[in-house]
Image: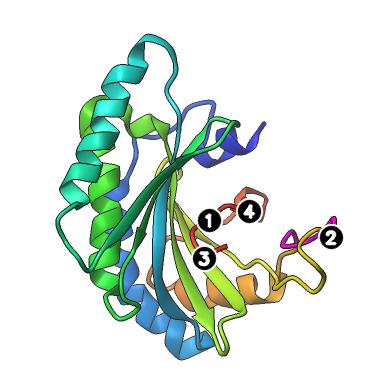
Amino acid sequence: MGVLDGLLGRPAPAPPDAGRLLALPAAAAELAAATGFAPTGEGGVCHRLVEGGAFGAFDRARREAGRLLSGDPARRTETTDDPHGWGWTRVTRAADDFERLIADLHLVEATLADAGYGRYLLCSAAAFRRGDGRQRLYVVHAPGRGAFYPFAPRPPDGPPDAPDHARRRNNLVETRARDALRETLPMEPDTARWFPLWDAPGL
């Protein structure tokens, strides 16, 4: 089973449950009180890319999401694709505007789902930081699983061209984040499904 399969919950993915994402702002207060992690204002929605004859309709749905996000000078958006079949819609707001950031991510999820591409949604991720900002934490929502999980990349110690640069996780931070969030969010119980997102917004 690949990363995409795991995030989608295959072989029988449940219908995307994007609405649960809206519970994240309330949970963020619990996370900050327990761990000191605060929102950075960065987040994004990741989805599979559609190929073939369906690409045109999918691209229109993604452009419609971008149109709905446009026009607010307090919000920055960016759409990126990679050669491995993933696409991101990245959104940045002020760090203290977390509730609106999550509403933006929910809008992207809902727009794609309403256009018939809900099963292509992989996850949404919101970034948090602690202290000087080197230690990052992402709270990831996998709608196909109806659950959240933490992802905490370790700050890189070596130069950018080092083989393991930005490719290590802080398991202790992830465990503490899960414990802080489990009373307010449905957490993914299978830690094997806590997939890393090395191209998440802000990394």
Magenta range is 163-167
10 and 56: which is toward the camera: 56
Label 3: element kind: strand
Q: Nearer the viewer, mark 2 or mark 4?
A: 2
Image side of residue 4 versus residue 116, left or right: right
**Which residue is pictured at 44% across the width and 85% down the height?**
32
Q: Which residue is mark 3?
A: 138
Q: Badge 1: few (under 14), some or many (20 or more) residues near its Cα, within 10 Å?
A: many
Mark closest to the chain's N terminus, 3 or 4: 3
- Amino acid at pointer 3: Tyr
Q: CA distance from mark 3 to mark 4?
A: 10 Å
Mark closest to the chain's N terminus, 1 or 3: 3
Question: Given contact means CB atoms under 8 Å apart, are the residues at marks 1 and 3 in contact?
Answer: yes
Image side of residue 13 versus residue 101, left or right: right
Image side of residue 2 versus residue 98, left or right: right
Question: Given contact means CB atoms under 8 Å apart, are the residues at marks 1 and 4 in contact?
Answer: no
Q: Badge 4: few (under 14), some or many (20 or more) residues near its Cα, within 10 Å?
A: some
* Image: 167 above or below 37: above
Mark closest to the chain's N terminus, 1 or 2: 2
Q: Which residue is mark 2?
A: 162
Q: Position of residue 156 (x, y in %)?
A: 74, 70
